[in-house]
Amino acid sequence: MPHSPSNWLAVASAEHVRLGRAQGFMQVCHGKAAPLRRLRPGDRVAYYSPSTRMGSKDGLQALTALGVVRETAPYAFDMGGGFVPYRRDVAWWSAHETPIAPLLPALDFTAGRKNWGYALRFGLLQISARDMDLIAAAMSVARVRDPVLEHPGHGLQPA
């Protein structure tokens, strides 16, 4: 039976997301492998960045990337200095970083919740297809031709 794609919201600083976007990968939860194993090829993933830099309190609160998980399994990557985080390859779509605040009343996981950020404390949250479609629209996602992005079952299909 084919996998029905899931939708995920990951959390990381914008600086870390931009690096992953430029190099075609994602990391979550300070490089832990277990959360990445929850994702399957064809799943859509968006990033929420509470700040520009890790540890900063600048209040960025923006959606910073959106893409589709590729066929590769999570893998360890030696960054030097003894830090070997796990990564997962992602086909990132062209998208504009955008503040999350205007979407808060409309998203299923935030609507009516004063402490909406609490749901994101573990770094990776499964969200509804409706929420992902709203996020994609807010980010003005540009669809590209790529076989992994044409996986049947996503709400977003390349033009």
Image (cartoon, rainbow, N blue to C red):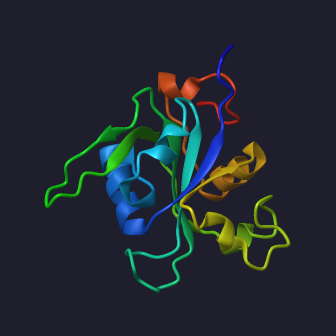
| Residue 77 visible to an observer of this rendering | yes
Q: Is residue 42 left or right of residue 126?
A: left
Residue drawn at x 65%, y 32% as measured from the top left: 5
* Rendering coords of residue 14 (x, y %): 42, 67
The image quarter containing residue 52 is bottom left
* Rendering coords of residue 124 (x, y %): 57, 55
User: Depth check: 8 or 29 in front?
Assistant: 29
Residue drawn at x 31%, y 51% as measured from the top left: 85
Residue drawn at x 68%, y 49% as measured from the top left: 132
| Residue 93 visible to an observer of this rendering | no
For the N terminus, the quadrant is top right
Q: Residue furthest left?
A: 81
* Rendering coords of residue 44 (x, y %): 59, 40
Count of numbered labels shown in the rendering:
0
107 in relation to 59, above or below: above
Residue drawn at x 74%, y 52% as measured from the top left: 131
The image quarter containing residue 114 is bottom right
31 in relation to 37, above or below: below
Q: Residue furthest top?
A: 1
73 in relation to 52, above or below: above
Q: Residue furthest bottom?
A: 57
For the C terminus, the quadrant is top right
The image quarter containing residue 119 is bottom right
